Amino acid sequence: MMEYRFATASDIDALIKSRLEMLRIVNDLEDDYVFGEDFVQASRDYFLKGDQITVFALHDSIRV
């Protein structure tokens, strides 16, 4: 079953993980590529303080 829900601050680790994974794929980076801490913090700030809404799509409680 598909479920859609708005992300909250408690989802920040999953949001960051998903963003970095997506950026590795679209930029053809190695799976073990390490992003700089400044970039990771800027992404974290964007999700927590930015003027945006993030929605999760969950299939049987797995984010897709």
Image (tube, helix red, strand yellow):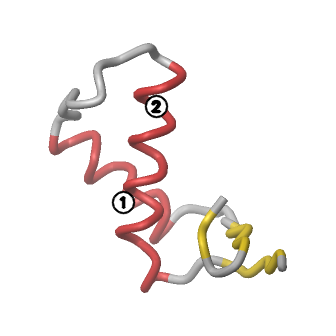
List x then y, in percent, for residue 3: 80, 80
* Nearest to the observer: residue 19 or residue 28: 28
Q: Residue at coordinates 39% horizontally, 42% vertically from top-left?
A: 20
Disc 1 marks which residue? 44
Q: Mark 1 or mark 2, which is nearer the start of the sequence? A: 2
Q: Residues within 10 Å of mark 2 (few under 14, many from 20)?
A: few
Q: Disc 2 residue type?
A: Leu
Of the 4 image quadrants, the one containing the C terminus is bottom right
List x then y, in percent, for residue 44: 36, 60
Q: Helix or strand or loop: what does disc 1 sit on? A: helix
Q: Residue at coordinates 39% horizontally, 56% vertically from top-left?
A: 16
**In the picture provided, is 54 more to the left or to the right than 26?**
right
**Please, which residue is most extreme toward the top here?**
28
List x then y, in percent, for residue 19: 47, 46
Residue 6's place in the image compared with 50, above or below, is: below
Disc 2 marks which residue? 23
Residue 21's place in the image compared with 28, above or below, is: below
Q: Disc 1 residue type?
A: Arg
Residue 25's place in the image compared with 59, above or below, is: above
* 2 and 1 marks in contact (CB < 8 Å): no
Disc 2 from disc 1: Cα separation? 14 Å
* Nearest to the observer: residue 31 or residue 34: 31
Q: Residues within 10 Å of mark 1 (few under 14, many from 20)?
A: some
Q: Helix or strand or loop: what does disc 2 sit on? A: helix
Image quadrant assignment for residue 1: bottom right
**In the picture provided, is 20 more to the left or to the right than 26?**
left
Q: Residue at coordinates 79% horizontally, 77% vertically from top-left?
A: 4
**In the picture provided, is 20 more to the left or to the right than 53?**
left
**In the picture provided, is 1 more to the left or to the right than 40?**
right
Q: Residue at coordinates 83% horizontally, 75% vertically from top-left?
A: 2
